[in-house]
Image (spheres, rainbow, N blue to C red):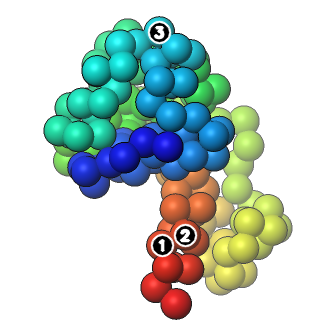
């Protein structure tokens, strides 16, 4: 599991993605063909992936190739208009409730653009884990 000292959307998401796969930084480095020291810098000093690193990372983790640039932009405090390809699965109230989201929240989530829905659903396990620690 990756140890993270930076707290931005990219590193939070990446740490969770690695945890879900049971990977550590070295596993990601092998799968993405990115130097381990580069990956370490993402977590320790908040450096963000650029260009081909983003593409390699998306391929290794099996996410839409436009998802990583979106997270990187959010981590810089920016927003990319139209940068996220529409994911094939759109949130519905039914599948959001199945993910443990309250029906009222699920109905509001279903109104958001698909790329925002995907980001929220990707972050949901992190939110659940943080909430569980607070109880």
Q: Gap between marks 3 and 2, in whole Å? A: 30 Å
Q: Gap between marks 1 and 3, in whole Å? A: 31 Å
Mark 3, residue position: 33
- Confirm whether residue 84 shows in the render: no
Mark 1, residue position: 130
Label 1: element kind:
helix
Q: How dense is the environment of label 2, judged by Cα within 10 Å: few (below 14), some, or many (20 and up)?
A: few
Q: Disc 1 vs disc 3: Cβ atoms closer than 8 Å? A: no
Residue 62 at what x, y percent from top left? 64, 26
* Residue at (57% x, 62% y) in the render: 124
Label 2: element kind:
helix
Along the viewing direction, whichever of 55 and 45 lies nearer the viewer: 45
Label 3: element kind:
loop
Q: How dense is the environment of label 1, judged by Cα within 10 Å: few (below 14), some, or many (20 and up)?
A: few
Position of 29 relative to 74 (above/below): above
* Residue at (44% x, 30% y) in the render: 25
Mark 2, residue position: 129
Q: Disc 1 vs disc 2: Cβ atoms closer than 8 Å? A: yes
Residue 13 at what x, y percent from top left? 45, 47
Of mark 3 and mark 2, the one earlier in the sequence is 3
* Residue at (73% x, 43% y) in the render: 89
Position of 46 relative to 48 (above/below): below
Q: Gap between marks 1 and 2, in whole Å? A: 4 Å
- Confirm whether residue 94 shows in the render: yes
Of mark 1 and mark 3, the one earlier in the sequence is 3
* Residue at (47% x, 24% y) in the render: 26
Q: Which label belongs to residue 77?
A: none
């Amino acid at each position: 599991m990756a140890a993270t000292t930076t707290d931005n959307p990219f590193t939070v998401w990446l740490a969770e993605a690695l945890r879900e796969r049971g990977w550590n930084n070295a596993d990601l480095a092998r799968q993405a063909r990115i130097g381990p020291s580069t990956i370490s810098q993402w977590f320790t000093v908040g450096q963000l992936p650029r260009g081909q690193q983003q593409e390699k990372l998306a391929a290794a983790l099996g996410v839409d190739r436009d998802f990583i640039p979106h997270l990187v932009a959010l981590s810089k405090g920016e927003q990319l208009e139209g940068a996220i390809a529409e994911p094939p699965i759109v949130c519905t109230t039914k599948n959001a409730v199945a993910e443990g989201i309250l029906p009222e929240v699920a109905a509001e989530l279903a109104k958001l653009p698909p790329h925002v829905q995907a980001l929220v659903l990707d972050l949901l396990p992190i939110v659940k884990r943080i909430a569980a620690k607070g109880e």
